[in-house]
Image (cartoon, grey):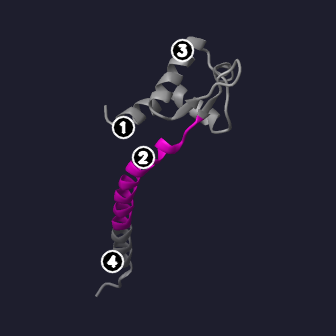
Amino acid sequence: MDRLSELFGALADPTRRAILARLAEGEATVNQLAEPFPISLQAISKHLKVLERAGLITRGKEAQWRPCRLDAGPLREVADWIADYQRFWEQRYDRLGDYLHQLQRDETKPEE
């Protein structure tokens, strides 16, 4: 699987996106990450494995607990890919703006 497909696959699930949002605030244990969700710890662990495989989180080992941490680096790849399409839409909006300005000028021209 290519890198972007793996990243988008990991980001496709709303639970995983919520986990990433929580980890953006700081590290957390699996139990802390599971608190807001009505799913089992096993299901949360599966989501964490997907995020870890995609490189979006790391899991440490400190004494008896394994804190999860966000690794936002791979999100740069997603942002860069999306940026190409952002330029596309900005160009489209610029052309639409030019067209609308031309229509306004044509409407305000006195008739001869």
Which residue is nearer to you in this view: 101 or 36?
36
Q: Secondary structure at mark 3?
A: helix
Give the distance between the C-alpha atoms of the residues marked 3 and 1, in whole angstroms.
24 Å
Q: At label 2, which amino acid type do we have?
A: Glu
Q: Is residue 95 above or below residue 15?
A: below
Q: Which residue is mark 2?
A: 77
Give the distance between the C-alpha atoms of the residues marked 1 and 2, in whole angstroms.
9 Å
Residue at position x 58%, y 36% in the image? 70
Q: Residue furthest right?
A: 63
Q: Which residue is mark 1?
A: 3
Give the distance between the C-alpha atoms of the residues marked 2 and 3, in whole angstroms.
27 Å
**Pair 4/2: label in front:** 2
Position of 7 compared to 65: left or right? left
Q: Residues within 10 Å of mark 3 (few under 14, many from 20)?
A: few
Badge 4 or badge 3: first in the primary sequence: 3
Residues at badges 4 and 3 in contact (C-beta under 8 Å)? no
Q: Which residues are magenta?
A: 70-96
Q: Is residue 112 above or below residue 39?
A: below
Estimate the x, y position of residue 67 in percent, counting from the top left: 65, 27
Q: Is residue 5 above or below residue 35?
A: below
Residue at position x 47%, y 42% in the image? 74
Badge 1 or badge 4: first in the primary sequence: 1
Q: At label 4, which amino acid type do we have?
A: Asp
Estimate the x, y position of residue 37 in percent, counting from the top left: 62, 19
Position of 32 compared to 110: left or right? right
Q: Which residue is mark 4?
A: 106
Badge 2 or badge 3: first in the primary sequence: 3
Q: At label 3, which amino acid type do we have?
A: Ala
**Pair 2/3: label in front:** 2
Q: Secondary structure at mark 4?
A: helix
Q: Which residue is mark 3?
A: 43
